[in-house]
């Protein structure tokens, strides 16, 4: 009885949409289907069209680069901030609270603000670079192909740092202080203490952070759509943005559902592989 409300909620708002999306990926679902209810079975045709598209290899590579670079930057900086805020100093709690702001702001607001800041002509970032005489013409943050990809990666890192910091900071707080005292008595310095005490004790929290981070980052949509719209020249087009375009711009709901299902499978595969690898490492 206690589990029933939670199970019902998960089944209604998570289970049903996923099942419906999977079923739709095997149908020829169009706008007409909403009125007639007729959606002929298409088999693997939608998946075949998605996989054989000319831009699919590039979209897959962009998704991998975006995810790997974002997760690496978020985790490294988040861990650095978490270790830094372990120390007690004046205004430490205030600064830790302010660090959560990027996580609390709506992503559309954050993306719009960053797009204004990175504008090649009037953005404050290029103005600052010119004022410091670091560049004469400015950096094409949003109009260059590789620069645009770097821009959305940096923005996503900025958005994800608070989540990583909050979870890792909580994990650091649970490590018993006497372990550090014992390591110090044995002559361990800060680096050795982190390697032999902090990291092994923090590994379960790191697993949660990385798995959730990858699942979230693979499906990032709003930041890219607001900042670059997938451009220029499809340089920031990912599987998530392509799925959105297929479903809500081209109204190819079957193909869009097929792309979404592939994203789900990729996320689940990563989670399973990483969790098994991490479990084997702990057993060793």
Image (tube, rainbow, N blue to C red):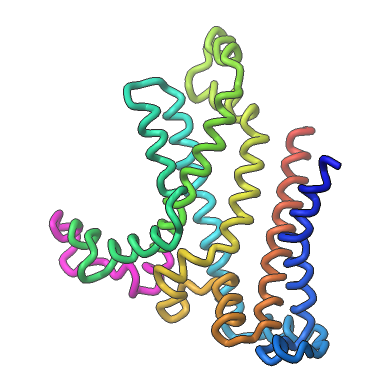
The location of residue 167, given as percent across then percent down, is: 56, 37
Q: Quadrant of residue 26?
A: bottom right
Residue 137 magenta-highlighted: yes
The location of residue 61, given as percent across then percent down, is: 57, 69
Extreme residue toward the right, this view: 1
Tell me: residue 254, above or below residue 151: below
- Residue at position x 48%, y 33% in the image: 82
Residue 239 magenta-highlighted: no
Q: Nearer the viewer, residue 81 or 64?
A: 81
Q: Nearer the viewer, residue 228 or 187?
A: 228
Region of the chain picked out in magenta, as a range: 129-150
The location of residue 75, given as percent across then percent down, is: 52, 44
The location of residue 192, given as percent across then percent down, is: 53, 22
Q: Nearer the viewer, residue 141 or 192?
A: 141
- Residue at position x 50%, y 56% in the image: 69
Extreme residue toward the top, this view: 185
Residue 36 as seen in the image, left or right of residue 65? right
- Quarter of the image for the C terminus: give it: top right
Residue 140 as seen in the image, left or right of residue 134? right
Residue 271 as seen in the image, left or right of residue 62? right
- Quarter of the image for the N terminus: give it: top right
Tell me: residue 188, above or below residue 185: below
- Residue at position x 41%, y 72% in the image: 228
Q: Quadrant of residue 178?
A: top right
- Residue at position x 61%, y 17% in the image: 176
């Amino acid at each position: 009885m206690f589990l029933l409300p939670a199970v019902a909620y998960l089944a209604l708002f998570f289970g049903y949409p996923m099942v419906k999306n999977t079923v739709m990926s095997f149908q020829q679902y169009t706008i007409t289907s909403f009125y007639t209810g007729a959606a002929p079975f298409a088999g693997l045709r939608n998946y075949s069209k998605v996989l054989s598209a000319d831009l699919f290899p590039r979209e897959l590579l962009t998704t991998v680069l975006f995810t790997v670079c974002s997760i690496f930057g978020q985790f490294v900086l988040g861990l650095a901030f978490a270790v830094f805020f372990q120390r007690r100093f004046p205004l430490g709690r205030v600064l830790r609270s302010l660090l959560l702001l990027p996580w609390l702001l709506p992503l559309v607001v954050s993306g719009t603000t960053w797009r204004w800041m990175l504008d090649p002509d009037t953005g404050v970032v290029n103005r600052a670079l010119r004022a410091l005489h670091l560049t004469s013409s400015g950096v094409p943050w949003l109009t260059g192909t590789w620069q645009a990809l770097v821009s959305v990666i940096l923005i996503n890192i900025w958005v994800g740092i608070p989540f990583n910091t909050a979870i890792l900071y909580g994990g650091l707080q649970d490590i018993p202080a006497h372990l550090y005292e014992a390591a110090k008595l044995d002559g361990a310095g800060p680096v050795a203490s982190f390697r032999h005490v902090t990291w092994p004790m923090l590994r379960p929290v790191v697993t949660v952070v990385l798995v959730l981070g990858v699942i979230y980052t693979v499906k990032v949509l709003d930041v890219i759509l607001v900042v670059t719209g997938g451009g220029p020249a499809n340089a920031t087009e990912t599987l998530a943005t392509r799925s959105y375009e297929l479903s809500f711009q081209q109204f190819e709901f079957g193909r869009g559902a097929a792309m979404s299902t592939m994203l789900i499978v990729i996320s689940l595969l990563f989670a399973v592989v990483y969790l098994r690898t991490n479990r084997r490492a702990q057993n060793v």
